Image (tube, rainbow, N blue to C red):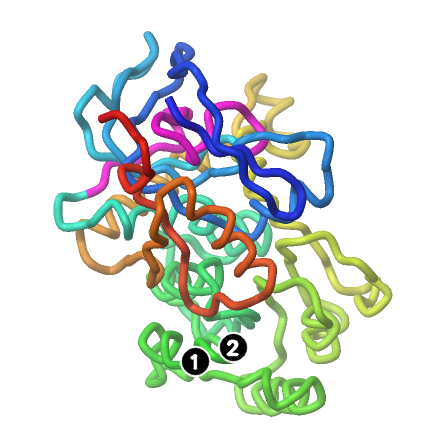
């Protein structure tokens, strides 16, 4: 099969590889559409010696399943979050996923839409529920809980808004720029949701956040889907100094702007492939539960949301050339040209592919 390997630059190399074989708890999928994420160009910059297929957003048809897999069978339409930095990524004709991070997609959902969801959806869910410990959909909020979503037009931000709404978390204080029209279609202004335009400058953003705090009460929770260019510094100027919680999707380059009194966490979506952080309950029960189970539940929730209509994928652009289009798309991501859009690749559009 053909597979795309991502080098620092980004530079993409198309190679021939064997079709993977699933492990006992794994699924091999014939990829119809692969999504992309900013980490696909960032990780080769950070770890240049590890040159691999960086694709993590799978949408396609199940090809083979492992001996322990019970929920899926060959021929099923699925989407899946591939284990980051592991073999079998989505930039290929066939990709590997774990059963717990795979979900069925309804017939009305296109593979293109489905490919926008896995990594960003898990990141949003983990940020809101695992890191900020906000109410889950089956125990929705019963009182106002202001939540700042910085980078609201990004895929992570957009999914955070959708998940917050089914958990009745409002008001949502959304910070966005060019993607504001997209965010307008996601929020509920009748419940106090609002949008702040970051293009007006840092001082203006901080002032608008302060006005929101005056209107809705102290701000205690923030999901920073940007986590660079001063985003978390702006947030922490307004978060409550005693009870504030902020979660970042990238390591802070300079955390001096985050007061020690504010609880800070990192939302690392790859942890759904690990056991949860040390938990006294695990020792007491003699079991390991947590992030894997969380990933399992959230993936099923995505599938149900798509079927019921309250959850939808990020707007997307199909990049021409299949696997050969990846390099150009990653360069656009690096240059910051994507706003409220996901770049996706139809694998069959790859020149020279033998179907």
Q: CA distance from mark 2 to mark 1?
A: 6 Å
Pointer 2 and pointer 1: residues touching (CB < 8 Å)?
Answer: yes
Q: Residue at x 67, y 50 (%)?
A: 266
Q: Residue at x 60, y 25 (%)?
A: 282
- Image height check: is 104 above or below 315? above
- Image height check: is 230 above or below 107? below
Q: Which residues lie in the magenta part?
A: 84-105
Q: Position of residue 259 (x, y in %)?
A: 82, 67
Q: Residue at x 54, y 90 (%)?
A: 215
Q: Position of residue 181 (x, y in %)?
A: 37, 81
Compare residues 110 and 226 and report the one nearer the observer: 110
Q: Is residue 293 left or right of residue 213?
A: left
**Residue beneath disc 1:** 180
- Image height check: is 314 above or below 115? below
Compare residues 160 and 16 and report the one nearer the observer: 16
Q: Secondary structure at mark 2?
A: strand
**Residue beneath disc 2:** 176
């Amino acid at each position: 099969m053909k597979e795309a390997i991502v080098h620092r630059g980004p530079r993409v190399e198309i190679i021939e590889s064997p079709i993977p074989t699933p492990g006992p708890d794994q699924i091999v999928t014939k990829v119809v559409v692969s999504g992309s994420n900013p980490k696909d160009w960032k990780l080769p910059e950070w770890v240049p010696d590890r040159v691999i297929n960086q694709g993590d957003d799978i949408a396609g048809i199940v090809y083979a399943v492992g001996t322990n897999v019970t929920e899926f069978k060959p021929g099923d339409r699925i989407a899946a979050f591939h284990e980051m930095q592991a073999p079998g990524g989505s930039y290929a004709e066939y990709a590997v996923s774990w059963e717990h991070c795979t979900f069925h997609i309804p017939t009305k959902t296109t593979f293109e839409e489905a490919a926008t969801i896995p990594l960003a959806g898990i990141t949003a869910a983990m940020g809101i529920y695992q890191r900020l410990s906000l109410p889950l959909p089956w125990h929705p909020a019963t009182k106002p809980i202001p939540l700042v979503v910085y980078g609201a037009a990004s895929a992570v931000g957009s999914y955070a808004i959708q998940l917050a709404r089914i958990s009745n978390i409002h008001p949502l204080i959304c910070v966005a720029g060019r993607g504001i029209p997209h965010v307008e279609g996601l929020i509920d202004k009748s419940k106090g949701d609002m949008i702040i335009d970051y293009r007006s400058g840092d001082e203006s953003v901080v002032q608008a956040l302060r006005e929101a705090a005056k209107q809705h009460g102290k701000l205690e929770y923030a999901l920073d889907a940007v986590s660079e260019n001063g985003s978390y510094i702006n947030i922490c100027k307004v978060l409550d100094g005693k009870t504030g919680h902020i979660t970042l999707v990238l390591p802070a380059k300079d955390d001096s702007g985050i007061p020690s009194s504010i609880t800070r966490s990192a939302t690392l979506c790859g942890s759904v492939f690990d056991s949860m952080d040390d938990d006294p309950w695990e020792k007491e029960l003699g079991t390991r539960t947590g992030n894997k189970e969380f990933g399992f539940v959230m993936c099923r929730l995505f599938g149900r949301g798509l079927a019921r209509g309250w959850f939808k994928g990020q707007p997307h652009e199909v990049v021409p050339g299949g696997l050969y289009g990846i390099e150009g798309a990653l360069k656009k991501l690096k240059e910051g040209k994507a706003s409220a859009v996901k770049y996706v690749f139809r694998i069959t559009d790859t020149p020279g592919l033998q179907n």
